[in-house]
Amino acid sequence: MNKFFKNLTSQEIISEFLPSLVISLMLTEYFYKFGSFTAECIVFIGSWYLLGAIINKLKSFKNNKK
């Protein structure tokens, strides 16, 4: 994990990593109430991954239009 963060620029962290993290945390807090910590963690990580992939795809789509 440490190598992962060292390879990211601050711009990448701000534009890709943090938005997906914050949105996933909000979704998990407000909508996922399974009563199981493990289930909520798995869904949180899945949401975070999916949102990160969507943000990355939108960013690459935007860059291809230029």
Image (cartoon, rainbow, N blue to C red):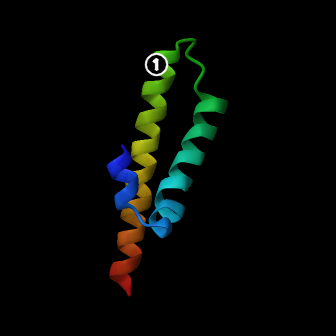
Quadrant, the N terminus: top left
Type of the residue with mark 1: Ala
Q: How many marks?
A: 1
The image quarter containing residue 19 is bottom right
Quadrant, the C terminus: bottom left
Question: Looking at the image, which residue is at 41% across and 76% down?
Answer: 62
Q: Position of residue 14 (x, y in %)?
A: 54, 63
Question: Looking at the image, which residue is at 48% across and 25% down?
Answer: 41
Q: Please tell me whether residue 37 is drawn above or below residue 1 in the rendered image.
A: above
Q: Please tell me whether residue 55 is drawn above or below residue 61 in the rendered image.
A: above
Label 1 sits on a secondary structure element that is helix
Q: Position of residue 57 (x, y in %)?
A: 36, 63
In the orientation shown, which residue stands out farthest toward the right? 30
| Circle 1 residue | 39
Q: Position of residue 54 (x, y in %)?
A: 41, 56
How crowded is the residue under tag 1: few (<14 C-alpha within 10 Å), some, or many (20+)?
few
Q: Please tell me whether residue 6 is drawn above or below residue 41 in the rendered image.
A: below
In the orientation shown, which residue stands out farthest toward the top? 35
Of 20 and 1, the residue lying toward us: 1
Question: Looking at the image, which residue is at 37% across and 79% down?
Answer: 63
In the orientation shown, which residue stands out farthest toward the bottom? 66
Q: Position of residue 42 (x, y in %)?
A: 42, 26
